[in-house]
Image (tube, helix red, strand yellow):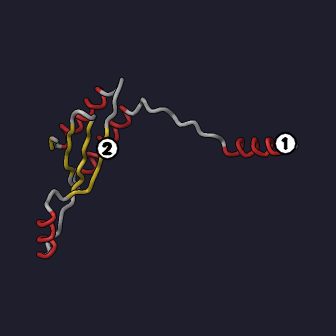
Amino acid sequence: MVLLQPDPFLNELTSMFERSTEKGSVWVTLKRSSLKSKVQRNKMKTAGESIEYRCLVRATDGKKTISTSVGMKDHQRFQASYATILKAHLTALKKRERKDKKKSAVDKKEEGSKKP
C-alpha cells in the first residue's frame, strides 16, 4: 500500500476509474485514524494532550492499492475534488427501477377482487 499526498492520490484514483470502465471495480474506503499506535494514543490521553484525528482514504482495484491521509484543514477541498471525480466516473451505474406504490396497491386490490 502506497501512502500518497492528497493531490497525487486523486490523480491515481482517476486513472483507476478510467482503467476499470470496461471491466472491473474500484473500492474506496474512508476511516478515521490518528496514525499513531494505541500505546502512543494512551500516553497522549494520560498526559492531557489532544489527539488530532485524520481521515484515512484507501482505494483499490484488486491489483493496486493506494491511500492518503487527509487532515481537518484540507478536508473540504479534498471532499469537493473527490465528489467531482465520483460524479464524472460513476456513469456506468444502472438506474434502479422503482415501482409506484399507488399502482402496486391498486393492482393488488384488483387481483383480490377478481378471485371468486
Q: Nearer the viewer, residue 104 or 72?
A: 104
Residue 115 is marked as 1
Per the image, label 2 sits on a secondary structure element best described as: helix
Q: Which residue is mark 2?
A: 80
Residue at 42 percent of width and 29 percent of height: 92
Residue 84 is marked as none
Per the image, label 1 sits on a secondary structure element best described as: loop
In the rendered image, which quarter contains the C terminus?
top right
- The CA distance from mark 1 to mark 2 is 56 Å
Residue at 18 percent of width and 62 percent of height: 52
**Label 2 Cα crowd, 10 Å radius (few <14 / some 14-19 / many 20+):** few
- Residue type indicated by callout 1: Lys
Residue 37: name its quadrant. Answer: bottom left
In the rendered image, which quarter contains the N terminus?
top left
Residue 40: name its quadrant. Answer: bottom left
The image shows residue 61, relative to residue 73, as above or below, that is above
The image shows residue 116, relative to residue 41, as above or below, that is above
Q: Position of residue 86 (x, y in %)?
A: 35, 37
Which mark's residue is nearer the viewer, 1 or 2? 1
Q: Is residue 18 left or right of residue 40?
A: right
Q: Nearer the viewer, residue 54 or 42?
A: 42
Residue at 34 percent of width and 41 percent of height: 83
The image shows residue 40, relative to residue 21, as above or below, that is below
Q: Is residue 93 left or right of residue 89?
A: right
Q: Is residue 9 left or right of residue 95?
A: left
Q: Position of residue 70 (x, y in %)?
A: 21, 50
Residue 48: name its quadrant. Answer: bottom left
Q: Position of residue 62 (x, y in %)?
A: 27, 35
